[in-house]
């Protein structure tokens, strides 16, 4: 240095990685606090279905899918036959 003083060494890494230090900074910011509060309000207060309920809901969706696909197929066949009759 110009005035003869020695340069200060960077602070010793206290065992934390870069990601950990970045996350601490984000958590302390207004945006970080907002996101944490949003997570608490949505994830922690939500009622999640049990495995049995989830399986039942999945079966309902699959059944509805098959019914709608069959309905569209029948409708397509009917309309195709009508179109051929018109030609």
Image (cartoon, helix red, strand yellow):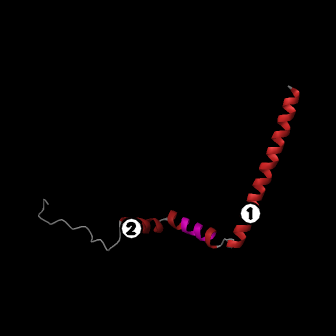
In primary-sequence order, the first of circles 2 and 1 is 2
Is most of the magenta stretch helix, strand or loop? helix
Q: Is residue 36 left or right of residue 42?
A: left
Q: Is residue 4 left or right of residue 20?
A: left
Q: Nearer the viewer, residue 11 or 73?
A: 73
Q: Which residue is mark 1?
A: 59
The reply to whether discs 2 and 1 touch (Cβ–Cβ < 8 Å) is: no
Residue at disc 1, secondary structure: helix
Can residue 36 be found in the magenta stretch?
yes
Using the numbered discs, state the Cα–Cα distance from disc 2 to disc 1 in whole angstroms. 45 Å
Q: Which mark is residue 51?
A: none
Q: Which mark is residue 21?
A: 2
Above or below for 71 versus 25:
above
Q: Residue at x 79, y 51 (%)?
A: 68
Instruction: Indicate the position of residue 42 as horizontal and vertical percent values.
Output: 63, 68
Q: Residue at x 43, y 69 (%)?
A: 24
Instruction: Sort mark 2 into few (<14), some (14-19) or many (20+) by Cα contacts within 10 Å.
Output: few
Magenta span of residues? 34-41
Above or below for 22 versus 72:
below
Question: Closer to the camera: disc 2 or disc 1?
Answer: 1
Residue 47 visible to the viewer? no
Instruction: Indicate the position of residue 35 as horizontal and vertical percent values.
Output: 55, 65
Residue 26 visible to the viewer? yes
């Amino acid at each position: 240095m110009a005035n003869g003083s020695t340069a200060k060494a960077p602070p010793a890494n206290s065992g934390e990685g870069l990601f950990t230090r970045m996350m601490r900074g984000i958590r302390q910011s207004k945006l970080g606090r907002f996101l944490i509060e949003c997570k608490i309000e949505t994830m922690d207060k939500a009622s999640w279905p049990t495995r049995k309920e989830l399986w039942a809901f999945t079966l309902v969706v699959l059944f509805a899918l098959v019914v709608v696909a069959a309905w569209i197929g029948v409708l397509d066949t009917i309309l195709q036959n009508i179109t051929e009759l018109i030609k």
